[in-house]
Image (cartoon, rainbow, N blue to C red):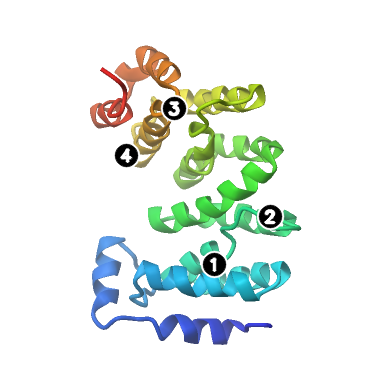
């Protein structure tokens, strides 16, 4: 089965709810077009696309959807590539990377990063490419380096190479603590908060060293799940 961009957009627009576009545009602070589609509806549609399209067709469709610069189309582009088993996946990874400089909204960035997380877990050597994002002049690119690596916060019994990656990413976070942009501070706190559920010792050690340089809200969020 093939699916053209026009067909895909028709299917997306058919899911719009009256009055929802204005609410979503305000909430997400969007100046781009917002169609007004509930997230579960987009999930269901993109699940169907994943089940019926080849990997090549999914990558092609994702690229075309992203280029429309429509809010839900960019979310759908990300969702159609959010899959653990995707072979071959080099084209998908390259496409996701190409989107990063376009990030300007947390919802779009986070959905794209969720797709990217699957590709990083599939091939952790790609962390080398992600590390280059940490010195970008583009705030959303720097933030993406932490959001896309959240899977490394979640192992209860990490293998040596997973611990090495965890410490590496904590080093990136340490380099961010003096950046007081709200989104960067939130990303650091998010990474530490998730890590604290699985590795309280490393989280405490980070906070003991860097918490005074973090924004108060970030310190509080990072420590929220630490055992007393």
- Which image quarter: residue 183? top left
Q: Which mark is residue 198?
A: 3
- For disc 4, the marked residue is 182
Quadrant of the image containing the N terminus: bottom right
The reply to whether residue 32 is visible in this rendering is: no
Q: Nearer the viewer, residue 125 or 65?
A: 125
Q: Nearer the viewer, mark 4 or mark 1?
A: 1
- For disc 2, the marked residue is 94
Element type at mark 3: loop
Reply above or below: 119 against 126.
Answer: below
Mark 4 is surrounded, within 10 Å at the Cα level, by few (under 14), some (14 to 19) or many (20 or more) other residues, namely few
Contact between marks 3 and 2 (CB within 8 A): the answer is no
Query: Is 1 left, or right, of 9 in this rendering?
Result: right
Contact between marks 3 and 4 (CB within 8 A): the answer is no
Element type at mark 1: helix
C-alpha gap between disc 2 and disc 1: 14 Å
Contact between marks 4 and 1 (CB within 8 A): the answer is no
Q: Nearer the viewer, mark 3 or mark 2?
A: 3
Q: Nearer the viewer, residue 113 or 121?
A: 121
Element type at mark 4: helix
Query: Is 89 left, or right, of 188 in this rendering?
Result: right
């Amino acid at each position: 089965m093939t699916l053209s961009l026009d067909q895909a957009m028709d299917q997306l627009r058919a899911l719009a709810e009256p009055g929802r576009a204005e609410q979503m545009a305000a909430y997400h602070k969007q100046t781009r077009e917002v169609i007004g589609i509930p997230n579960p509806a987009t999930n269901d549609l993109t699940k169907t696309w994943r089940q019926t399209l080849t990997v090549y067709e999914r990558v092609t469709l994702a690229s075309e959807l992203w280029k429309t610069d429509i809010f839900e189309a960019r979310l759908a582009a990300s969702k159609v590539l959010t899959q653990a088993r995707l072979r071959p996946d080099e084209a998908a990874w390259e496409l996701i990377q190409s989107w990063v400089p376009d990030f300007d909204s947390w919802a779009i960035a986070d959905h794209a990063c969720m797709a990217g997380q699957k590709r990083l877990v599939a091939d952790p050597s790609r962390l080398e490419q992600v590390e280059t994002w940490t010195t970008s002049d583009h705030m959303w690119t720097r933030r993406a380096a932490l959001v896309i690596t959240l899977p490394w916060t979640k192992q209860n019994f990490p293998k040596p190479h997973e611990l090495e990656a965890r410490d590496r990413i904590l080093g990136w976070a340490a380099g961010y603590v003096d950046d007081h942009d709200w989104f960067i501070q939130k990303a650091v706190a998010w990474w530490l908060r998730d890590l604290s559920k699985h590795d309280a010792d490393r989280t405490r050690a980070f906070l003991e060293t860097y918490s005074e340089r973090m924004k108060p809200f970030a310190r509080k969020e990072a420590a929220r799940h630490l055992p007393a």
